[in-house]
């Protein structure tokens, strides 16, 4: 089968012909249709996440059909459409797994990082971590929901849990990429006011945010028109944490939603005082997946995608690295799905 292989960090992926894997106990063999590409893939390829499996097939927003079942699998049928997220497995027996916080399991395994992912014609997945996908989304449109959507939803859920019950909140989204463009729709649907914060000079992302319902879009180092109840940071820039703290009101919360972030600079205690909070979000749980994939059709979420062919993965990574598109990049593995040529608008 065709696959794009990472042989060493900070090196381009190499196209290779490798054997189709065989599913073991509890596993699915999935014929990949499409695989979303997100900033975590960049962190893996760029060596910012340590100790990846090498050689590695990256990619962790996988959409495909079940091609074969491993021994003991009864939860999925051959031919079923499934989605595979970043969290690819856990031990199932530690205290975190028993508390349905399997995202914190020390033996958790991650798709496209510690096990081969979806930049290939076939992949394996733990049947417990393969989600049934909602109807009404084609394969390209649903792919970004599996990481950008899920991590955004978990950040959103933990944010709401930290705030006192209220009909409307002012929510700041720092870094308006794949996750923010999905979460913006969810928050607006729920009746909240979204404030988008983008890089200096990024007028395109600011306009994109406004089209999706943001009440304002401004540079990340500029205070909002009104104090925020909460800020969610998707950009991997530590300097945004003090900026977001200054933007949130008393009792507000700053949620860091990325898996990797540059160092947070020092800031005065006064910026944190008056019961402001900072917290991180780690990965996702099966509950997050089930809840968000049920919610997405009700909003309804509409993803903006930029398609690339499997052979164009390196170009897609570079375009993501430099912010050359709106929304989310999706690698079209089954090229019969679309004319995946990013030169054509």
Image (spheres, rainbow, N blue to C red):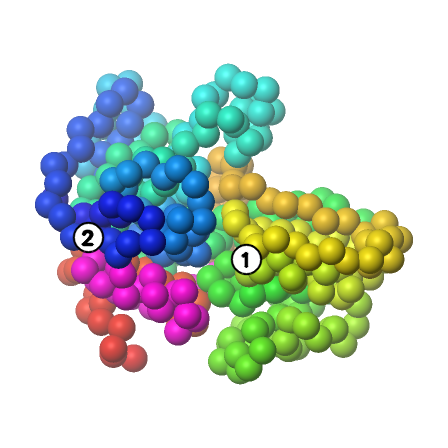
Q: Nearer the viewer, residue 260 or 329?
A: 260
Relative to 197, 325 lies left or right: left
Check if residue 163 falls in the magenta segment.
Answer: no
Q: Nearer the viewer, residue 338 or 44?
A: 44
Residue at 54 percent across and 67 percent down: it is: 176
The x and y percentages for residue 98 are 56, 21
The x and y percentages for residue 266 are 73, 56
The x and y percentages for residue 218 are 64, 77
Crowd rating for badge 1 (residues with CA inside 10 Å; few <14, some 14–19, many 20+): many
The answer, for residue 167, to whether it is visible in the render is no
The answer, for residue 260, to whether it is visible in the render is yes
Look at the picture and state if 260 lies above or below 287.
below
Q: Nearer the viewer, residue 99 or 200?
A: 200
The x and y percentages for residue 102 are 52, 29
Specify start and end residues of the magenta stretch as a single range.
301-324
Q: Secondary structure at mark 1?
A: loop
Look at the picture and state if 242 lies above or below 277.
below
Give the residue pinned by disc 1. 236
Q: Nearer the viewer, residue 136 or 65?
A: 65
Residue at 27 percent across and 61 percent down: it is: 314
Q: Which mark is residue 14?
A: 2
Where the C terminus falls, by quadrant? bottom left
Upstream in the sequence, badge 2 or badge 1? 2
Where the N terminus falls, by quadrant? top left
**C-alpha span from label 2 to label 1:** 26 Å
Relative to 13, 16 lies left or right: left
Crowd rating for badge 2 (residues with CA inside 10 Å; few <14, some 14–19, many 20+): some
């Amino acid at each position: 089968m065709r696959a794009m292989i990472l042989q060493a960090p900070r090196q381009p992926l190499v196209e290779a012909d490798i054997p189709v894997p065989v599913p073991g106990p509890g596993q699915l063999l999935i014929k990949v249709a499409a695989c979303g590409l997100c900033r975590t893939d960049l962190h893996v390829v760029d060596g910012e996440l340590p100790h990846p499996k090498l050689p590695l097939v990256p990619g962790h927003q996988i959409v495909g059909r079940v091609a074969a079942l491993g021994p003991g699998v009864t939860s999925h049928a051959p031919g079923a459409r499934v989605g595979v997220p970043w969290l690819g497995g856990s031990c199932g027996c530690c205290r975190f797994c028993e508390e349905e916080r399997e995202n914190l399991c020390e033996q958790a395994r991650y798709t496209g990082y510690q096990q081969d992912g979806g930049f290939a014609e076939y992949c394996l997945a733990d049947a417990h971590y393969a989600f049934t996908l909602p109807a009404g989304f084609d394969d390209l449109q649903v792919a970004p929901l599996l990481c950008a959507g899920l991590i955004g939803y978990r950040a959103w859920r933990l944010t709401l849990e930290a705030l006192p019950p209220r009909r409307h909140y002012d929510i700041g989204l720092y870094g308006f990429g794949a996750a923010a463009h999905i979460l913006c729709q969810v928050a607006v649907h729920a009746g909240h006011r979204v404030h988008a914060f983008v890089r200096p000079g990024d007028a395109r992302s600011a306009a994109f945010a406004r089209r999706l319902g943001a009440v304002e879009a401004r540079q990340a180092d500029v205070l909002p028109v009104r104090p925020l109840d909460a800020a969610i940071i998707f950009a991997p820039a530590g300097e945004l944490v003090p900026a977001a703290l200054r933007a949130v009101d008393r009792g507000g919360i700053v949620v860091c939603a990325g898996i990797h972030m540059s160092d947070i600079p020092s800031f005065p205690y006064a910026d944190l005082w008056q019961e402001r909070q900072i917290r991180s979000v780690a990965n996702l749980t099966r509950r997050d997946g089930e809840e968000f994939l049920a919610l997405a059709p009700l909003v309804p979420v509409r993803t903006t995608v930029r398609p690339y062919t499997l052979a164009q993965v390196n170009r897609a990574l570079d375009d993501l690295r430099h912010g050359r598109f709106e929304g989310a990049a999706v690698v079209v593995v089954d090229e019969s799905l679309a004319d995946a040529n990013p030169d054509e608008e």
